[in-house]
Amino acid sequence: RANPLVILLVFMEQTQATPPDFDAYYQMWVDRMANGHNALSRAMHYGYTHNPEFAMSPDQAKRATNALVATRLNLSPEGTYVLADLGCGVGGTIPDMLQTFPNSHICAVNIHMPQLRLLRDFPCFPAERVSALNADFTRLPFRDNALDGAYAIDSSCYAPNKSVFYAEAMRCISPGNNLVVFDVFNKRLPENSLERTALARSLNGWAVPNWHPARLEGFFYSYRFTEVTEY
């Protein structure tokens, strides 16, 4: 069959390290979001701007990320789709996606149940249009070709084995549709011990096991993605 397109968004120079315990880190985010952190966007991800000289608030920048990802799904707003938010956090991206694709249903996938509970407790949670799934995005509860698109915003970095994440996402997305990844990628490997130490500390700070690999095309093509576009 044809294979989905991978869209790769936002690139930074990083390396690998062993993360601290995930549960305490995830719970920290639950506590922050419950206490009003990013109250407008409800986002746990980085913001985006195409013009660094244009001033944006953190919430505006995070919602700009949502808009960029929605655009790269390359779907008609009039269509009816089943989409997956892979590593949804507390669902901050979902309201913008539902506004962009008003006839669609979103599967919000998160391995951390307290974050999903907080998502469902937010006011006006659209239960008829969102399925909150407590699942591992490397073992998704979808049949083959079940999704019309999927996105992972600053979340797929938490997959210990990136190849498993991409292969599983590819399995679930229907032919010709897109997987959009907004995340941190290696642009190059560290060149000395100072760089290795500094970048390992940044990984530990985010509780990330490793970043996505530096040599992108060979990695993705080996898992039978037929087109890879970097932005």
Image (cartoon, rainbow, N blue to C red):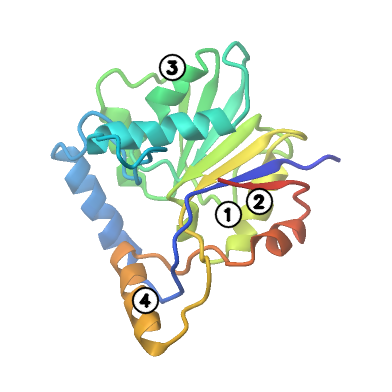
Q: Which residue is mark 4?
A: 200
Q: Position of residue 85 (x, y in %)?
A: 49, 37
Counting other residues with Cα less than 10 Å from the Cα at mark 2, is it few (<14), some (14-19), or many (20 or more)? some
Secondary-structure class at tag 3: helix
Could you give the CA–CA distance between mark 4 and mark 2, rounded to whole angstroms? 27 Å
Answer whether residue 151 is visible to the viewer in this image. yes
Q: Which residue corresponds to the image point at 31% horizontal and 38% vertical from the top-left?
A: 43
- When the figure is inspected, residue 167 is found, relative to residue 208, above or below; the finding is above
Q: Are marks 4 and 2 in contact (CB under 8 Å)?
A: no
Closer to the chain start, of discs 1 and 2, is 1
Judged from this view, the residue extending furthest toward the bottom is: 193
Question: Mark 4 or 2 closer to N-term?
Answer: 2
Q: CA distance from mark 3 to mark 4?
A: 38 Å
- The kind of residue on which mark 2 rests is Glu
Label 3 vs label 1, nearer the camera: 3
Relative to 86, residue 66 above or below: above
Q: Position of residue 197 (x, y in %)?
A: 34, 82
Residue that label 3 marks? 99
Residue that numbered label 1 is attached to: 138
Three-letter code, disc 3: Gln
In-front residue for pair 146/157? 157
Check the image and report above or below for 210 versus 131. Answer: below
Location of residue 146 (image quadrant): top right
